[in-house]
């Protein structure tokens, strides 16, 4: 390979990074059998009398949290069970019952407040509905909303607990009693 030769290097991935002008320092040392050293941009050029090799080094920085980690053994069956539970929970359709109950409770509350601000008498049918039925309906629907929301939250908490039973705790260095 001579200094004036215009053939591109064999490795096409490095072809766009290395310009032929950067190889001038290699061609000056073609007779040497040693590494030429760093030419430019962290590119190392090496001459072994037959081929010109190009090596580019990159600094890799590993976050401190990865340096301080240790590996924890986990059974495939435990991971599979936990994954199946999570996928099943993901596929469940959301329940709109609590939202509907809260909407109806606020509607009944608005109906009651509208009856208070108007001149509706308690002896009439609108008065009975607005001043007697509406507050009872608002309270009943709001209580039902609270209980359904609490039940949904408890179900999510139970699912998380069941999944955590199948996963290893990286902070707990002792082995489980149910290892078999």
Image: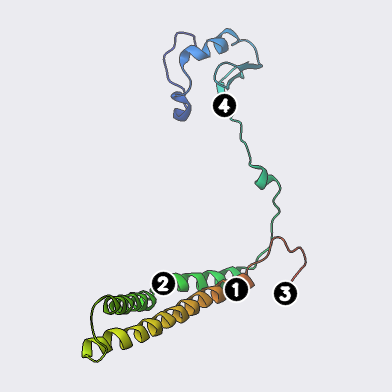
Q: Which residue is at 35% across, 83% downward?
A: 135
Please tell me in which quadrant of the rendered image residue 80 appears. bottom right
Q: Is residue 136 left or right of residue 32?
A: left
Foreground mark, 1 or 4, reads 1
Tell me the CA gap for discs 4 and 3. Answer: 48 Å
Q: Which residue is mark 2?
A: 91
Tell me the CA gap for discs 1 and 4. Answer: 49 Å
Q: Nearer the viewer, residue 71 or 19?
A: 71
Q: Is residue 170 visible?
A: yes
Q: Is residue 70 above or below residue 16?
A: below
Q: Which residue is mark 3?
A: 179
Q: Is residue 4 above or below residue 66?
A: above
Q: Earlier in the sequence, mark 2 or mark 1?
A: 2
Tell me the CA gap for discs 2 and 1. Answer: 19 Å
Q: Which residue is mark 4?
A: 56
Foreground mark, 4 or 3, reads 3
Please report contact status of discs 4 and 3: CB closer than 8 Å, yes or no.
no
Q: Earlier in the sequence, mark 1 or mark 4?
A: 4
Q: Nearer the viewer, residue 5 or 105?
A: 105
Foreground mark, 2 or 3, reads 2
Q: Which residue is at 48% across, 20% downward?
A: 18
Q: Which residue is mark 1?
A: 161
Q: Position of residue 180 (x, y in %)?
A: 71, 77
Tell me the CA gap for discs 1 and 3. Answer: 18 Å
Foreground mark, 2 or 1, reads 1
Please report contact status of discs 2 and 4: CB closer than 8 Å, yes or no.
no
Foreground mark, 1 or 3, reads 1
């Amino acid at each position: 390979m001579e200094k004036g030769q215009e053939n591109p290097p064999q490795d096409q991935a490095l072809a766009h990074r290395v310009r032929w002008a950067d190889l001038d320092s290699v061609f000056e040392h073609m007779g040497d059998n040693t590494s030429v050293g760093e030419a430019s941009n962290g590119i190392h050029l090496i001459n072994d009398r037959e081929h010109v090799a190009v090596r580019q080094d990159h600094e890799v920085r590993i976050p401190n949290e990865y340096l301080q980690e240790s590996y924890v053994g986990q059974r495939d069956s435990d991971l599979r069970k936990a994954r199946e539970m999570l996928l099943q929970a993901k596929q469940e359709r959301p329940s709109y019952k609590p939202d509907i109950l809260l909407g109806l409770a606020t509607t009944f509350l608005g109906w009651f407040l509208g009856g208070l601000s108007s001149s509706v008498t308690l002896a009439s049918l609108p008065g009975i509905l607005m001043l007697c039925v509406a507050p009872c309906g608002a309270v009943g629907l709001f209580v039902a909303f609270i209980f359904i929301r609490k039940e949904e939250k408890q179900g999510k908490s139970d699912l998380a607990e069941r999944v955590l039973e199948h996963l290893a705790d990286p902070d707990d260095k002792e082995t489980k009693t149910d290892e078999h």
